[in-house]
Amino acid sequence: MTADRITSILLAGIIAGIVTLISSVSFAALIFHGALTPYISSGITILISTAVVAGSLFSLLSSARPVVALPDDDTAPVLALMATLIVASFPEGTPGEVLFVTTFGALACAALLTGIVMFALGYFRLGSLVRYLPYSVMGGYFAGAGWLLIMGALRVVSDLPLASAQDYLALLSPDVMLRWLPAFLAAGFIRWAIHNWHKSLAMPASMLLLIILFYSVAALAGLNPGDLMAGGWLVGPFPATQPKLFNPVLLQRSADLDWAMVIGHLSSIGTIIMLSAVSLMLTASGLSVMQRNNFDINRELMVAGFANTVSGIGGGLIALPSMSLTELATTVGAPKSRLVGLVVALFCALMLFFGMSLIAWFPKPVLAGLLIFLGVSLLERWLIEARKQLPRLEYLVVVFIVLVVAVVGFLQGVMAGLLAAIVLFVINYSRINVVRYALTGRERGSNVERNSAEDKFLRDNGDQTLILKLQGYLFFGTAATLVTTIEERLADKEIAPLRYAVLDFAQVTEMDSSAALSFMKLAQEASQSNFFLLLTGLTPTMHTRLMGSWFEKESTSYLQIMPDLDRGIEWCEERILKEQSLSEAHEGIMQQLSRFLPSPDDHKILGQYLELRQVEPGDHLARQGDPSDEMFLLQSCTASVYLDTSSGKKHRIRRAGTGTVFGEVGFYLGTPRTASVVIDTGGELFVLSQEANSRLEQEHPHIAAALHKFMIRVITRRLQLTTTTLQAVLT
């Protein structure tokens, strides 16, 4: 390792260490105030120890190089709020030692549980679950944390609990204003310095200048350091204590803890765990971009879980990597080395054991100014800048959460935000059209190959069939919209009355019970309005939910369940055709061909080249992969075409009726069979082989040409129908 590299590591580590130390002291002042003020020296020891222990573990184990970790600033205000609530829950006159030990134990318990949960999330590779938290709710949480940081800073400098309207009015008294106004001025100066000075020096230099300015103004006012200490302007005085890196309160003083109080605030700990996971995800994403390295979020969760578990057992608080401090170290010139974070931890350890007397002289307005700056930064990012990034309703969720946090409390704001996000999701998702496309029978027919008369009749009467291809998740909002669509079609008097409504569920992921109730009401409407309701493509789960919950109670013949959309449309077509008597309905293939032949007797010549076969249901005419050496012309039978999949299942892709042709594409192209053909109803068919076709072309070219013209007509008509369906789907 070169001297320049060592110098860069030391410089970056010391600068980041100074900011880490100041931040730890600020968070200690934020958490250990009011009745816990006499224990602020212990609080500072706890926070700095957390920075040393957890910071070292993150530096050694994290994929990020470098990485600087410290007590988490996003959860610090929530921890402070929890500490305040715990103290307030004790009866008046409770000894301070009891208050401190229980609060300290609750904070360590929060770190321990956070570590366990985060490690479990990473171990079971559930890190992606954090991404499901709505962005608006996430923004509201962090903006609410920013508000709590500002309120905590005011409590630090004013020594007011800020728990009632009288406390807030007391902030306007001249003596109290003299306490908190310098803190806001300090926050403004820090913000200005960060935006105008070099990033590597802005934070430590601004803090140093503010300390010098504070003591200079105090000297001009005739106040010496002793007067400032006695007047409560400084962090100290500290009682004589022996600093320790490990303070295992959960192990050594478990019997002294009021566990009922700790258990009573598990909801707050749950909120802290969630905030920590979200904060880690955002930080890991930011570090990944900054260091141009893709981090495994599950591995980082395990690292954070292990570090916080050790921190909680050792009496520390929650710690996470800091994006700003890691960027600060990188800006100074820190190389990609784990040693940077270790230097930060070493600097904090030295100050813990040898510099506590200096920390006691740290001005409260400067510490409060740092807290206000951090709080305003969170509000600016998540409340002001988010206005340009979020839709109006989602932004209102952020504002709503902040208002509830400010007026009621953080936990209530969390719950209200989740509820608002759920309501907003339901409203927005209800607006999503679950109908992928809506077609009539004129635009979408079944895959049954029919003769020209049947096909024309079905197209002319296709408006009485409505086909809805559904998609996504069906619940009460989207299902109600679907029912409205069908009701509007029933009310439309300008087209033929609705006789068949086909709903295809093949691309529906799931439905809830309220959606099933909507379809029950739709079945009732079908029986009353005299139309058939066909449900196709239902999964076994959806079928069970529908039939078991609702439709078995509906004694109506107007409901049909079909395995797929094609069979559902075929069922409708068969009913339409049965209602009419067509002279050409069962015209054989030879009768159709005779109209295309040059002379009336040519069909007899053509018949000499065709093989007449008698087939029975279930006979295989062709198998997928076989040579296409024959073309089949159905005279009085029907057949279905099945596609064999790699999973061993068969999918019906086409059905050929009486008077139709199949196998013509492979026959003319000379390619192997792409599907298998099975007879549905027995009867007669004609077979034209490749050898017979060649002889026909040589011996009777005019008849062969007429046959090919007929086949071109058949193929073109299929292509035309497919094009019509595609146009309807794409428009």
Image (cartoon, helix red, strand yellow):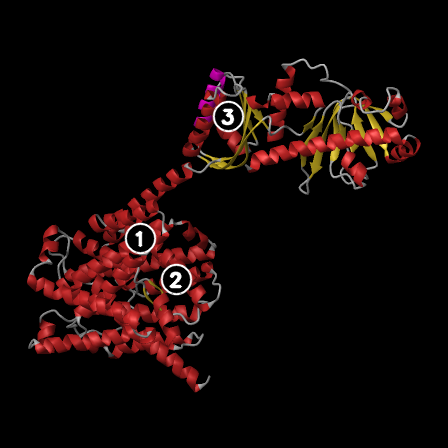
Per the rendered image, the range of residues in magenta is 517-529
Residue at horizontal 70 percent and vertical 37 percent from the top = 643
Binning the other alpha carbons within 10 Å of mark 3 as few (below 14), some (14 to 19) or many (20 upward) gives some
Counting from the top left corner in percent of width and height, residue 467 is at 55, 28
Numbered mark located on residue 540 in the image: none
> Which amino acid does the dot numbered 3 rest on?
Met
- Front residue of 279/356: it is 279
Horizontal side of 239 relative to 58 (left or right) equals: left
Question: Which disc is residue 283 wearing?
Answer: 2
Q: Tell me if residue 174 is in the magenta stretch.
A: no
Q: Is residue 564 visible?
A: no
Magenta stretch encompasses residue 524: yes
Is residue 218 shown above or below 531? Answer: below
At x 76% / y 33%, what residue is drawn? 712
Give the residue at mark 3: 547
Element marked by disc 2:
helix
Q: Amino acid at mark 1?
A: Tyr
Q: Position of residue 484 (x, y in %)?
A: 43, 27
Count numbered badges in the picture. Answer: 3
Disc 3 element: helix
Above or below, comparing residue 409 to residue 710 in the picture: below
Q: Secondary structure at mark 1?
A: helix
Residue 624's spot in the image, x, y percent?
76, 38
Q: CA distance from mark 3 to mark 2?
A: 49 Å
Q: CA distance from mark 2 to mark 1?
A: 15 Å
Depth-wise, is mark 3 or mark 2 nearer the camera? 2
